[in-house]
Image (cartoon, rainbow, N blue to C red):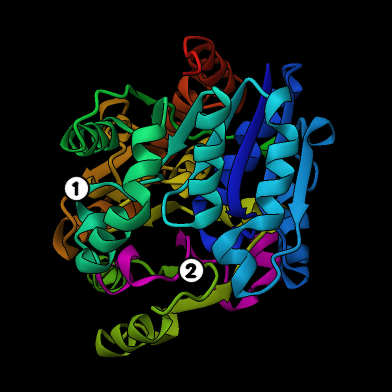
């Protein structure tokens, strides 16, 4: 097939969508499809983008159509991006847009619609009830003026989980449409992870950990991720127990100050370590040496970080609002309410019982191998594309 993925930008500091779009596209390219990825690219982002794409399976076969972002006029009217897509559209079998609230995404779906090419929209959680409750008046206005037309023009919606599928289906029916909503989860390239860094590589870079077991958080440091809850739970878990550490890794996104204050309030400031973003092998080294991964997020479409931790053989302790129930059903960790007390119980159990933690991590690795690798996910996506027809 001839496929064009569209996303606003590929900077991994923006969160999960750039990782998802690039990996899904590369997996499809590796399977022999002609795949392009249309996006804007700012020069200052290139180092992070290169680190994200380095060594990606299928990356050499993926055609990246990077457009200069220009100023506000280009970002609003998307003339340069539109012209490129218009030049390509007759050569495409499907356009797959990642996200909602951006003119380049709206334009790509509308161009596809006019050309009779199926347009797939992956909202990445942006149409979930929780997301729509954030800045509701602004989003309602945007929908009325521009984005309802885009969403009505879609041939299919790509949901990341059963929860997102339900939310998106309800939203679409509210528009008076019966557009199909299919679950295409996120995944990993095992080739990017295996072999894992040697044990101790992260400890060697961070002697301040003193070789003690640690819990790792690896995501954007955003208020939605629940860092104060995690710090409180960690402080409770290590009270009257063997020493442990909490490693908080990820790009700044407005929540580090609150997490630092929580660490001081709970008396664990000397045991909470902020190590900044970790890309490529540094990320896998952090996961390799950890005892467990924790994410008490308020909302996740599908947590890439949790999936990567599982692929590294690491048990996870996540909130039920991460919408990753397989973790509990497959014995790969703990899924619990987004509260400090149950998270503390989970961390306490994983820190105290290394054999149990190891067994859960092995179950998590099996789960990923069976259900969440990009080649399998790419195959499912292409099968769904083939069932669509342009209008």
Q: Is residue 211 magenta?
A: yes
Relative to residue 150, is residue 365 drawn left or right? right
At 19% across and 57% down in the image, what residue appears? Answer: 338
Q: Nearer the viewer, residue 65 or 319?
A: 65
Of the image marks 2 and 1, the number of the one nearer the N terminus: 2
Q: Quadrant for residue 78, please give it.
A: bottom right
C-alpha gap between disc 2 and disc 1: 21 Å
Q: Is residue 140 placed above or below 308 in the rendered structure?
A: below
Q: Quadrant for residue 177, please give it.
A: top left
Crowding around mark 1 (Cα neighbors within 10 Å: few <14, some 14 to 19, many 20+) is some
Relative to residue 299, is residue 377 drawn left or right? right
At 46% across and 48% down in the image, what residue appears? Answer: 99
Q: Nearer the viewer, residue 370 or 206?
A: 370
Q: Position of residue 37 (x, y in %)?
A: 69, 40
Crowding around mark 2 (Cα neighbors within 10 Å: few <14, some 14 to 19, many 20+) is many
Relative to residue 29, is residue 382 drawn left or right? left
At 65% across and 33% down in the image, what residue appears? Answer: 4
Count of number-bearing discs:
2
Q: Nearer the viewer, residue 132 or 147?
A: 147
Q: Is residue 9 placed above or below 355 in the rendered structure?
A: below
SS at mark 2? strand
Q: Nearer the viewer, residue 320 or 52?
A: 52
Q: Which residue is denoted by mark 2 in the rendering?
A: 247
The stretch of residues the image draws in magenta is 201-229
Q: Is residue 263 placed above or below 297 in the rendered structure?
A: below
Q: Which residue is denoted by mark 1 in the rendering?
A: 336
């Amino acid at each position: 097939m001839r496929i064009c993925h569209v996303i606003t930008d590929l900077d991994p500091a923006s969160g999960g969508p750039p990782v998802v779009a690039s990996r899904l596209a590369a997996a499809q390219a590796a399977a022999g499809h002609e795949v392009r990825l249309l996006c804007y690219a700012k020069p200052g982002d290139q180092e992070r983008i290169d680190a994200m794409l380095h060594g990606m399976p299928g990356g050499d076969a993926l055609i990246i159509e990077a457009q200069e972002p220009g100023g506000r006029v280009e970002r609003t009217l998307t003339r340069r991006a539109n012209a490129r897509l218009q030049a390509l559209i007759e050569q495409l079998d499907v356009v797959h847009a990642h996200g909602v609230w951006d003119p380049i995404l709206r334009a790509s779906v509308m161009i596809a619609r006019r050309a009779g090419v199926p347009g797939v929209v992956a909202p990445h959680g942006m149409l979930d009830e929780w997301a729509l409750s954030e800045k509701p008046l602004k989003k309602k206005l945007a929908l009325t003026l521009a984005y309802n037309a885009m969403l009505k023009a879609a041939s299919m919606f790509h949901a990341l989980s059963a929860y997102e599928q339900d939310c998106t289906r309800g939203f679409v029916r509210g528009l008076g449409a019966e557009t199909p909503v299919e679950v295409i989860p996120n995944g990993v390239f095992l080739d990017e992870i295996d072999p894992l860094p040697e044990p101790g590589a992260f400890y060697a870079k961070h002697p301040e950990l003193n070789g003690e077991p640690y819990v790792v958080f690896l995501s954007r440091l955003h208020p939605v991720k629940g860092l104060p809850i995690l710090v409180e739970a960690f402080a409770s878990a290590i009270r009257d127990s063997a020493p442990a550490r909490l490693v908080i890794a990820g790009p700044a996104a407005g929540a580090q100050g609150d997490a630092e204050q929580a660490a001081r309030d709970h008396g664990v400031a000397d045991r909470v370590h902020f190590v900044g973003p970790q890309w490529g092998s540094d990320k896998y080294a952090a996961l390799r040496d950890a005892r467990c991964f924790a994410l008490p997020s308020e909302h996740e479409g599908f947590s890439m970080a949790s999936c990567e931790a599982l692929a590294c053989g690491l048990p996870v302790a996540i909130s039920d609002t991460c919408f990753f129930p397989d973790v509990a059903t497959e014995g790969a960790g703990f899924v619990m309410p987004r509260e400090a007390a149950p998270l503390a119980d989970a961390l306490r159990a994983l820190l105290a019982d290394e054999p149990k933690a190891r067994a859960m991590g092995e179950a998590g690795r099996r789960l990923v191998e069976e259900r969440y690798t990009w080649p399998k996910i790419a195959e499912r996506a292409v099968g769904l594309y083939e069932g669509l027809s342009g209008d």
